[in-house]
Image: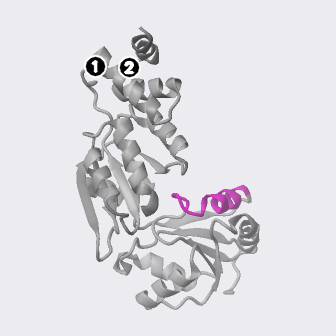
Amino acid sequence: MGEMSDVGRLVLLGAPLGNPADASTRFREVLASADVVAAEDTRRLTRLARDLDVTIPGRIVSYFEGNEERRTPELVEVIQAGYLVALVTDGGMPSVSDPGYRLVRAALDAGAPVTAAPGPSAVTTALALSGLPCDRFCFEGFLPRSPGARRSRLRELATEPRTLVIFEAPHRVAGALADLADAFGADRPAALCRELTKTYEEVLRRPLGDLARWAAEGEPRGEITLVVAGAPETPAERPDDDALKAEVAERESAGLSRRDAISEVATRHGLRRRDVYTVVHR
């Protein structure tokens, strides 16, 4: 390790999303001066350092979801001993749907300084490229993995007026988009951003229904960020009773309980659950 100082510190490094040229000068300087570099993927970090022509003299250790609970107190001890620890993930800022929060919290609880060399963010990059309103937005991270829990979460978000930013895995994005179109309406504007800053960057700006059909034709590859317009301020025209009954029946035939089917239909149209219940049982 390097020469020990009176006070160690933790530096969070905002890593390039894909294009090494996005690495800041400070990112390079911290890599070249840190006593310990904790990386989500050590091999990926080594390749990045080679692309940047940066030599990392410090010790490189892995820090990912599987070992962060064990590794965190070790790194806090290093910081308390007066050394500089840098934390870097595979892309973007640590802690944002990536390892890091646990270490930040532990370092702060131990009275250690925490700072950042900010860099690229998939959240704000996708938001800016989406063409959707950016003045107010909320970040949902990854949706629940199980379809039932995912649909339940989306029912809660269907009336959210702010633009939504969501991360999703390629093998789950088709199901997520189908559920989004069902919960939010097929006409809700959205953008699917994949491989941001990389050679095959692609941004598809289409209604949710169109994106769901596109994703169903074949599993998209690469890192995916979804941006979805918030709920319109003026509620859509209320469907007639027969249409409401048909929507509830359709969901029941798909396996939902009547209670859940009524809840989904009510949420989708901005209606009270009690009113839809009355229509169905009239």
Compared to residue 37, the image places residue 222 above or below, namely above
Question: Disc 1 versus disc 2: distance between alpha carbons?
Answer: 8 Å
Residue 6, percent across and down? 71, 74
Residue 114, percent across and down? 60, 63
Residue 76, percent across and down? 73, 68
Q: Is residue 163 magenta?
A: no
Compared to residue 260, the image places residue 245 above or below, namely above
Q: Residue furthest top?
A: 282
Q: Is residue 32 visible?
A: yes
Check disc 2 and report the residue beneath it.
Answer: 271
Looking at the rendered structure, the kind of residue marked 2 is Leu
Q: Nearer the viewer, residue 162 or 219?
A: 219
At mark 1, the secondary structure is: loop
Mark 1 touches mark 2? (CB < 8 Å)? yes
Check disc 1 and report the residue beneath it.
Answer: 238
The residue shown at (43%, 32%) is: 251
Label 2: few (<14), some or many (≥20) within 10 Å? some
| Span highlighted in magenta in the image | 95-109
Rendering colour mode: one colour
Q: Is residue 147 rendered to the left or right of residue 51? A: right
Q: Is residue 52 rendered to the left or right of residue 58? A: left
The residue shown at (28%, 31%) is: 232
Looking at the rendered structure, the kind of residue marked 1 is Arg
The residue shown at (31%, 15%) is: 241
- In terms of secondary structure, what is the magenta stretch mainly? helix
Q: Which mark is residue 207?
A: none
Q: Quadrant of the N terminus?
A: bottom right
Q: Nearer the viewer, residue 163 or 77?
A: 163
Q: Is residue 104 magenta?
A: yes
